[in-house]
Amino acid sequence: MSGLRFKFMLVIAALLWAGAVPAMAAAPLKILALGTSLTQGYGVPPGQELPAVLQARLNASGYRVKVINAGVSGDTTAGGLSRLDWSLADRPDAAIVELGSNDALRGLPPKEIEKNLTAILTRLKAANIPVLLCGMQAPRNLGAEYDRQFDAIYPTLARRFDVILYPFMLEGVAMNPKLNQADGIHPNPAGVRIIADRMMPFVQKLLARVPGAHAKE
């Protein structure tokens, strides 16, 4: 009787394991969103920050993904670099890098900004993590030479590292009072939705670089 009971338990265990395998395979892909307050969601209600809106858009399109909000208000490229290893502890499958706006607001040297972003992209490449790099533009009060050097950082690095470039993070939102909060800098919920809509094709290109990532029919 004990032998029959043992065989029965083995059958049950095998069935449970067979059922667990598809569940594990269905785990959502993880996208690390490493950025500033634009990623973190400064001033917008919970659930309306960019990572949450992107995740909802992607899930609605058939992708099983989780977008990890690693945005820190006021963060610089140096700050993003310093916390990169901690952010990678979640073992993301892909990454969105949105850094540099606060560096420009502080007038930090473009060469220093490029150096920090280079280190971030080098680390992600070594980990075989595909990247979507979000470009920024200088605030146009630091002189034409600063603008030229800063604006060139993102396309230059995108080519060097063969990463996907979203040319301007605030495209279609910057300088529009209806899409920004009272400070004129941070998008309101409507502005966030526009950014998410414009970024979607680029995020889909990013996911195309992740093995096994595709929208379910």
Image (cartoon, rainbow, N blue to C red):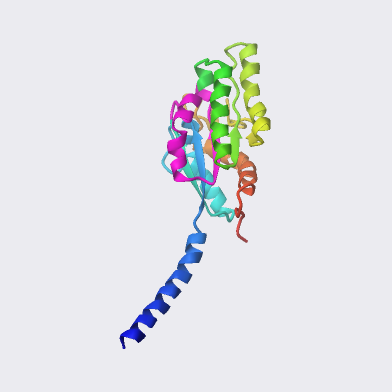
Nearest the viewer among 119 and 174 is 119
Residue 168 picture location, percent across and down: 62, 30
As for residue 80 lying within the magenta part, the answer is yes
Residue 78, image x and y in percent? Answer: 48, 24
Position of residue 205 in the picture relative to residue 44 (left or right) = right
- Decide if residue 195 is in sight here: no
Q: Which residue: 49% across, 57% down? A: 27
- Span highlighted in magenta in the image: 73-102
- The reply to whether the magenta stretch includes residue 88 is yes
Q: Quadrant of residue 130?
A: top right
Q: Quadrant of the N terminus?
A: bottom left
Return the residue nearer the eye: 167 or 85.
Answer: 85
Who is closer to the viewer here, 177 or 45? 45
User: Farthest right residue?
Assistant: 159
Picture residue at 60% right of the left edge, 34% below the top: 133
Write the residue at 63% across / 24% down.
Answer: 153
Q: Evaluate whether residue 91 shows in this view.
A: yes
